[in-house]
Image (cartoon, helix red, strand yellow):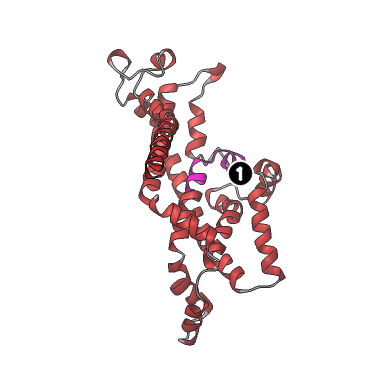
Amino acid sequence: MGVRKAKHGGVLTVIFTILSVIWVCPILIVIMNSFKKKAYINRKPFAFPAGKSFVGIENYLNGIKKINFFQAFGYSLFITLFSVVVIIVCTSMCAWYITRVTNRMTKGIYYLCLFAMIVPFQMVMFTLSKFANMLHLGNPVGIILIYLGFGAGQAVFMFCGFAKGIPLEIEEAAMIDGCNPIQIFFKIVFPILKPTCITVAILEAMWIWNDYLLPYLVLDIKKYKTIPIVIQYLKGGYGSVDWGSMMAMLVLAIIPIIVFYMACQKYIIEGVVAGAVKG
């Protein structure tokens, strides 16, 4: 029996290793091509940069100069950081309220959040862009409110699952000691929600940082451009593309989110399982 399990484990290890390599290969190809001349990228996209094809960091310097990368990086960082903070604070409070107050209104809010998870963005994007324009939300601060609306569904669902498992006696003891509801939440409940907070932060940050369509539709792109938007400006007329600079900018764009993910990855499974199982 043990030998059979060992064989199955070895086969699964090989399969998942192959799948991991397949998933990582596109990233490695982008990194390799970011150090090659444009002509060699088109001719031999899978070859290592060496000899005449190797240009060092020239593609990186050209890309940064052409699209004003650091300004776009600043806008993307501001929007991602504050959107994630607003989503975590607002949805965790909402989920705690839903789990502690049971009535038709809270049930309605919960089901609306679930419904928001399954509605495709393409279904509402034109109406959304119109309302965003009417309400003057086409700026980095205004789009944070829009991300809160789109990110609330999944976050509330995860926080509700975890909050149901928090013993009510802890909150009652804090209330007896003189804490008001706001103090109970931030001093007692919110620290307990840390695993789910980190999981939500990772999922929302990866989505917002890499999002192209919503900023393109909502932001005034004459003034504000995020990284996914400015990278598109490396495409010229008549189908010409500066592939070297584009590959280099893609590498710079994925580094921050990969570093953030690697730093917090150990909390993902813990938070997902806790939010899905508890209660």
Q: Name the magenta segment's main secondary structure.
A: helix
Q: Disc 1 marks which residue?
A: 218
Q: Measuring 33% from the left and 24% from the top, which residue is drawn there?
A: 58
Q: For this view, does 219 lie left or right of residue 270?
A: right
Q: Is residue 207 magenta?
A: yes
- Evaluate whether residue 82 shows in this view: no
Count of numbered circles in the view: 1
Q: For this view, does 65 lie left or right of residue 234?
A: left
The quadrant where residue 40 appears:
top left
Q: Measuring 52% from the left and 21% from the top, which residue is drawn there?
A: 236
The quadrant where residue 51 appears:
top left
Element class at badge 1: helix
- Evaluate whether residue 84 shows in this view: yes
Quarter of the image where the N terminus is located? top left
Q: Is residue 25 magenta?
A: no
Task: From the top left corner, tell me how far across and down residue 108 is, in percent.
Answer: 70, 64
Q: For this view, does 218 lie left or right of residue 26?
A: right
Task: From the top left corner, tell me how far across and down residue 32 is, in percent.
Answer: 36, 25
Q: Measuring 49% from the left and 49% from the top, which residue is drawn there?
A: 203
Identify whether 150 is placed above or below 182: above
Amino acid at pointer 1: Val
Q: Residues within 10 Å of mark 1 (few under 14, many from 20)?
A: many
Task: From the top left corner, tell me how far across and down residue 246 is, in percent.
Answer: 44, 27
Q: Which sits in the foreground, 146 or 188?
A: 188
Quarter of the image where the C terminus is located? bottom right
Identify whether 50 is placed above or below 151: above
- Residue lying furthest left in this view? 51
Q: Which sits in the foreground, 30 or 22?
A: 22
Q: Which sits in the foreground, 41 or 218?
A: 41
Task: From the top left corner, tell me how far across and down residue 159 is, in percent.
Answer: 54, 62
What stretch of residues is rendered in magenta?
205-220
